Structures are given as structure tokens and as C-alpha cells.
Image (spheres, rainbow, N blue to C red):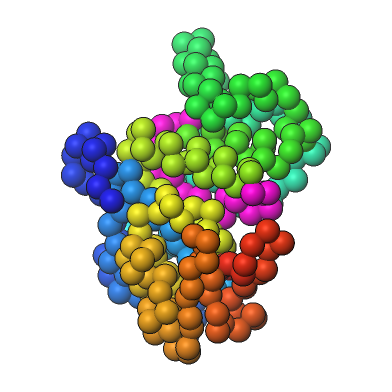
């Protein structure tokens, strides 16, 4: 999908990988990966356990060097603490005993690595935090202790935290994990609204593509050192997944949802939901 917002950029892809290879020891996660993610593009990253999805995000964050190849963020090499990147991590950290208000959590995305802001800096910080809270409709949580918020409310704040620095790239590591359907839809729509309004490139690692299927422009599917890149219609099909997994896989559409048949439960989760059929889920 090509967005009008592409015209606002200089033509440099927000994310670019050339000949990228990653692995540990004798095991290759992926190699020969050439990928450009354009402004405003929504890329879903899928694959089974251990296929390197979260490792890819670590590479883009400058936390993990490539085995071979090149990675650029907005035309410059990936580096730690890059202001061009906003990051929504998995919900792992327990915040019940952390003495933070909602606006404090959001502000960490802007100046968590800096101290001693002057008066003008504090005013600008407050303005940007307020704008980020408003953008995700979370102003009502601004003064609430984060330990008292629900998972969905807290995830709104994490989206605001990732966006408060006005990033060019938004990296999302399973941001829908442990959320109910309503909050999955809300968080997905917040991310989609941002990429459409600001031209932010989105890389969205997920174990469940169905909640975001209508939003996705392209899919990067990683399996055992192999990968495919293309539209959901091109990648999420029986022939493509059968070739990736080297076994017979059938992909069906049921009520606008994807159902995958033929994968071993141990390597590719396929859960049956009470309100619908079995749905595709790739683990980390």
C-alpha cells in the first residue's frame, strides 16, 4: 500500500536491511535478508518459536549486531538510544510496586536517559507528554498510579511512551499479548492511526495476525532460516507456507479470519477460541 504521507519524506526508507544475516553458533535465523520498510507502512513479522522475530527488533534497536550485511534506520546505522525509533516491548515487567503515575511512564520515552532539564525543557516535556496522552486517549490515566491500571490501560500508556518522541519507526514486540479482544482492537487502531497520520513505519511482531489482518501492508514470515516477504494475500497461502515449513500446510479463510491446518502444535501454535475457529498464531 502506498500512502500520501510518503511525499513528506526525502525518499530514504525508515528501515533498510541489505544482505542481513543473523544466527547463533551453527544456527542461522535468517540470511540474505533484503528489506525496505517505507514511511507509513505496516509490516507484520510472523514465524514460529525461535525464528528470530524479536532478535530482528533487537538488531534494529542497535542491541544486537548482524552476523553479516547492513541495517540502516533513516539512512544511518542502527544504534542504541536512537530517537528515530519508538519501541513497545512485551508486557513482562510488573509495575504494581513502581511509584509512577501514567504521565511519568510516558515521559520516560522522552527523557528517561537525561537528567537536569531546565525550565524550558520541563515545559516542552510536559507539552509533549500531554500531546502523547491525548493521542491515545489516555489523559484520564495521567495521574493514576500505573500499578492500578488494567492491562489495556497500561498498554495505551506504553503506546504513548513509544510515540512521545515523534519517532520515524515504531517497533512493536507482541503488543497485543494478554489483551482481550476489545483492547487488542483499541491498541491496533492506535498504532494504525499513528502510521497514517504521521507516516511512521511500523514493524509489528505478533503471535496472532487476525486482529491486525486488515491493517497489514506486507508480511515478513521467518521459518528455520528461511523467509518470505509480500502482501498477506501472497504470503499467507497454502503453497507459500508449505514451502517455508517443508511440509503440507493448508491456509483457509473463515469469516475473514485465517485458519492454518497441518502444523505441529509444538512448533506453531494454533489455538481454538471460544468465539471463533482456530486462528493462525506464530510464537516468538
Look at the picture and state if 233 lies above or below 85.
below
Please identify the residue farthest to the top as the structure is shown. 119
Quarter that holds the C terminus: bottom right
Is residue 214 something that shows in the picture? yes
Which residue is more in the foreground, 23 or 168? 168
Please identify the residue farthest to the front as the structure is shown. 255
Q: Residue sitting at 43 percent across and 36 percent down? A: 193
Q: Residue sitting at 57 percent across and 63 percent down? A: 207
Look at the picture and state if 210 lies above or below 150.
below
Magenta span has 180? yes
Magenta span has 9? no
Q: Residue sitting at 71 percent across and 61 percent down? A: 274
Q: Residue sitting at 57 percent across and 50 percent down? A: 175
Which residue is more in the foreground, 126 or 204? 204
Q: Which quadrant would residue 10 be assigned to in this image? A: top left
Q: How many marks?
A: 0
In screen coordinates, is 8 left or right of 53? left
Give the residues in magenta.
164-181
Measured from the top left, where is residue 230 in percent x and y? 32, 65
Measured from the top left, where is residue 281 in percent x and y? 57, 67
What's the magenta bit mostly, secondary-structure-wise? loop
Is residue 79 something that shows in the picture? no
Please identify the residue farthest to the bottom as the structure is shown. 247
Q: Which quadrant would residue 244 be assigned to in this image? A: bottom left
Look at the picture and state if 223 lies above or below 180.
below
Look at the picture and state if 190 lies above or below 32.
above
Measured from the top left, where is residue 32 in percent x and y? 30, 74
Which residue is more in the foreground, 53 or 104? 53
Measured from the top left, where is residue 101 in percent x and y? 70, 26
Amino acid at each position: 500500500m502506498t500512502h500520501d504521507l510518503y511525499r513528506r519524506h526525502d525518499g530514504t526508507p525508515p528501515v533498510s536491511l541489505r544482505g542481513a544475516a543473523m544466527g547463533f553458533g551453527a544456527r542461522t535465523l535468517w540470511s540474505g535478508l533484503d528489506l525496505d520498510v517505507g514511511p507509513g507502512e505496516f509490516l507484520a513479522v510472523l514465524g514460529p518459536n525461535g525464528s528470530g522475530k524479536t532478535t530482528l527488533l533487537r538488531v534494529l534497536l542497535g542491541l544486537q549486531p548482524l552476523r553479516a550485511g547492513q541495517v540502516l534506520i533513516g539512512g544511518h546505522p542502527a544504534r542504541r538510544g536512537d530517537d528515530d525509533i519508538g519501541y513497545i516491548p512485551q508486557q513482562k515487567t510488573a509495575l504494581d510496586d513502581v511509584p509512577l503515575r501514567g504521565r511519568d511512564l510516558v515521559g520516560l520515552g522522552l527523557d528517561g536517559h537525561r537528567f537536569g532539564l531546565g525550565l524550558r525543557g520541563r515545559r516542552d516535556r510536559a507539552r509533549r507528554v500531554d500531546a502523547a496522552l491525548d493521542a491515545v486517549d489516555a489523559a484520564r490515566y495521567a495521574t493514576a498510579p500505573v500499578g492500578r491500571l488494567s492491562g489495556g490501560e497500561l498498554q495505551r500508556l506504553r503506546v504513548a511512551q513509544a510515540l512521545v518522541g515523534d519517532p520515524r519507526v515504531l517497533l512493536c514486540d507482541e503488543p497485543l499479548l494478554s489483551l482481550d479482544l476489545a483492547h487488542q482492537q483499541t491498541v491496533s487502531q492506535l498504532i494504525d492511526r499513528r502510521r497514517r497520520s504521521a507516516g511512521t513505519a511500523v514493524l509489528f511482531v505478533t503471535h496472532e495476525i487476525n486482529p491486525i489482518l486488515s491493517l497489514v501492508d506486507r508480511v515478513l514470515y521467518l521459518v528455520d532460516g528461511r523467509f518470505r516477504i509480500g502482501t498477506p494475500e501472497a504470503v499467507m497461502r497454502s503453497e507459500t507456507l508449505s514451502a517455508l515449513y517443508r511440509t503440507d500446510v493448508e491456509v483457509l479463510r473463515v469469516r475473514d479470519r485465517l485458519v492454518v491446518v497441518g502444523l505441529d502444535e509444538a512448533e506453531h501454535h494454533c489455538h481454538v477460541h471460544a468465539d471463533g475457529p482456530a486462528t493462525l498464531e506464530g510464537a516468538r
